[in-house]
Image (tube, grey):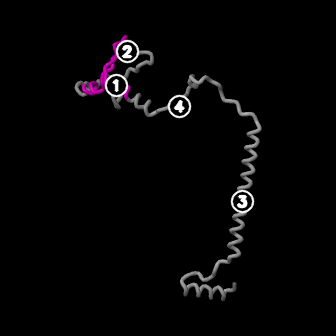
Amino acid sequence: MSNKQQAEVLQESLEHGHEVRDANPWNVALYGGGMLTLIIMVGLVFSVIVYDIMVRASRGAPPPPQFQMPQNELPPAPRLEEHPWLDLKDLRDAETRQLESYGWVDKEHGVVRIPIERAMDLIAQRGLPANPGGSNPSGPKTSVPSQSPGKK
């Protein structure tokens, strides 16, 4: 198309307020047909591949199980938790009971556990122990006895 024809089409389009040239139906049909052909070919290729995989899998022997075990026996650790939110709730409840009760930490050495509210009241009444060396300005050194797994 020459510059004069392009200018005439542009002027006509501006007068009408829209594009006045039509799309070439032959080009649109050719493009649509090419896309449809491409989609069908890709579908056929994938169908052949999937069919081949299925045929090969059906011919061979079934794969052996990873391990054989009786129905009543649990699998080896680590196992997935069936209800992790319930296990977490039980853990939090046990921790809360431990924080709110008296008990022995180490009976041989006379170490006891007191409720946390009572411990905070005692600290508020008596204050924190003084730092005898005065060398640690960040705060007093305190040791918290840990409960060994075998002792309660």
- Snapshot quadrant of residue 38: bottom right
Report the residue that reaches farthest toward the left: 125
Q: Secondary structure at mark 3?
A: helix
Q: For marks 4 and 3, give the CA distance.
A: 45 Å
Q: For the N terminus, which image quadrant?
A: bottom right
Which-is-in-front pick, marks 4 and 1? 4
Q: Report, in whole angstroms, how far the alpha carbon at label 1 lies from the one at label 3.
A: 68 Å
Task: Report x, y in % for residue 118.
Answer: 26, 25
Where's residue 42, x and y in %? Answer: 72, 57
User: Along the polypeptide, which appears first: circle 3 or circle 2?
Assistant: 3
Circles 4, 1 touching at the beta carbon (< 8 Å): no
Rate crowding at label 3 as few (under 14), some (14 to 19) or many (20 or more) other CA atoms within 10 Å: few
The residue where tag 2 is placed is 106
| Tag 1 residue | 97
Q: Quadrant of residue 3?
A: bottom right
The circle drawn on residue 80 is: 4
Q: What are the residue bounds of the magenta stretch? A: 93-121
> Under tag 4, what secondary structure?
loop
Residue drawn 36% across and 25% down? 141
Measure the C-alpha gap from mark 2 to mark 1: 18 Å
Q: In front: mark 4 or mark 2? A: 4
Question: Of the residues under marks 1 and 3, which one precedes in the sequence?
Answer: 3
